[in-house]
Image (cartoon, grey):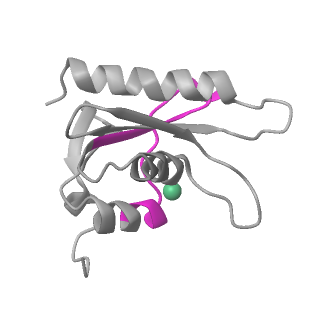
Amino acid sequence: MIDRKDLELIEEARKVINKNFDEVNENHTVGAALRCKNGNIYVGVNVYAIHGSCAEYIAIGSAITSGEREFDTIVAVRSPKKNNALIPPCGNCRQLLMQYAPDIKVLLQTSNGIEKVSIEELLPHSSY
Ligand SMILES: [Zn+2]
């Protein structure tokens, strides 16, 4: 069940991608927002290169850089050109989340609406 804080987290992800979306170069196309267990929120956008980084990585890296270690919920959204739709984490991000935040919840768009699922559900039978 999602709550007001989850909706606020989605709004933070939308704000950061809407502010940084590079429509000309089709760059910075995903925004992520991460809420720590203490309530602090960190955001990120994806950056492209040969080995670019997903928005989730940037958000987690920013939080860790600021000393955070306890993570509660994360969400990623597409650019305004893609209606800011929620996007599930890629396989690499699922592994990151499992290693750094094994009890984190992920907000996802499903056929039942927005749902909050555990990383265990997204990466079952993991070695972590
Ligand atoms: Zn990813």
Return the residue found at the far left.
1
Is residue 80 shown to the viewer in this render? no
Q: Position of residue 50 (x, y in %)?
A: 76, 66
Q: Where is residue 39 in the image (x, y as percent from the top left)?
A: 24, 31
Return the residue found at the far bottom.
127
The structure residue drawn at horizontal position 25% and vertical position 76%, both measured from the top left corner, is 126
Above or below 25: residue 89: below
User: Horizontal placement of 57 versus 27: left or right?
Assistant: left
Queried whether the magenta region covers residue 83, the answer comes back as yes
Residue in the foreground of this view, choosing between 19 and 80: 19
Q: Where is residue 125 in the image (x, y as percent from the top left)?
A: 21, 77
Is residue 22 shown to the viewer in this render? yes
User: Horizontal placement of 53 versus 7: left or right?
Assistant: right
Q: How many marks?
A: 0
Location of the N terminus by quadrant is top left
Say which quarter of the image contains residue 21: top right
The structure residue drawn at horizontal position 21% and vertical position 62%, both measured from the top left corner, is 120
Return the residue found at the far front.
67
Residue in the foreground of this view, choosing between 24 and 101: 101
Q: Where is residue 51 in the image (x, y as percent from the top left)?
A: 69, 67
The structure residue drawn at horizontal position 44% and vertical position 60%, both measured from the top left corner, is 93
Above or below 128: residue 120: above
Above or below 85: residue 37: below
User: Horizontal placement of 45 versus 85: left or right?
Assistant: right
- Magenta range is 73-94
Location of the C terminus by quadrant is bottom left
